[in-house]
Image: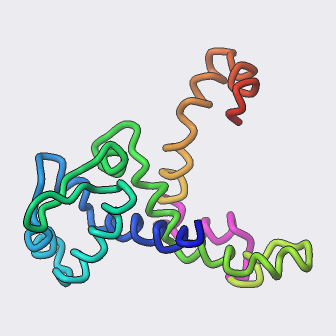
Amino acid sequence: MIAGAWITQGIYVVTQLGIADLLKDGSKSYDELATTTGVDARSLYRLLRALASIGIFAEGNSGYFELTPVAKSLRSDRTDSLRGYAIKSGQAWEWEPWGHLLEGIKTGKPVFKNIFGMERFDYLATDPFASKIYTQAISSISGEQDAAIASGSYSRLQSDGIE
C-alpha cells in the first residue's frame, strides 16, 4: 500500500501515452511502443514491467506486452473507460493536496487553496483541460449510480454500500 503513489503515477503515465489503446489489437514490444509514443525505450520497459508486476499489463516473451482486464479499462474507446479518472489522478491539482494531508489534519482546513491560491472548483473553472479531465473522470465512475437514481433504485445501491 505504501507504493500507492508510484502505482497511480505509473498508471497515469501509460494512460497519457495511450499504451492501452496501442495494445488493443494485440501485444507489442516495448521498443515499438516507445517509438510510437516518442519516449525512452528502457524507461518505458521498466515502467511496463513494474505495472505488469501488479497486473496492469502482462509481459510475454522478449519484452512484448499485452492488455489485462484491468488495462482494458484504460482504453479510450470503451464506454466504461477509466482513462479520464487515471489522467485526473496523475494531475498535480489532484495529487499535490494529498502531500499536504498532515497540514490539513492538524489545522482542520482544506489545503487546496493554500497550494493553488483558489478553491478546487474555481481552479477547474480557470483551466479548460483540468475541467474536461475532471468531468470525464467523474462521469466514468458515476454510471451505475446515475442509472440507479434514474430508475428509482438508488436506495438499493445505498444498502449495497455503493454511494
Secondary structure mostly seen in magenta is helix
Residue name at image x 62 percent, y 78 percent: 96
Please tell me in which quadrant of the rendered image residue 64 appears. Answer: bottom left
Magenta-drawn segment: 116-132
Residue name at image x 34 percent, y 69 percent: 50
Residue name at image x 74 percent, y 71 percent: 119
Of residues 150 and 154, the one drawn nearer to the viewer in this rendering: 154
- Residue 128, placed above or below residue 117: above
Of residues 52 and 146, the one drawn nearer to the viewer in this rendering: 52
- Residue 38, placed above or below residue 12: below
Residue 40 rendering spot, x and y as whole percentages: 19, 84
Of residues 124 and 110, the one drawn nearer to the viewer in this rendering: 110
Q: Split into 4 quadrants, where in the image is the C terminus?
A: top right
Residue 120 magenta-highlighted: yes
- Residue 90, placed above or below residue 162: below
Residue 111 rendering spot, x and y as whole percentages: 78, 77
Residue name at image x 40 percent, y 53 percent: 83
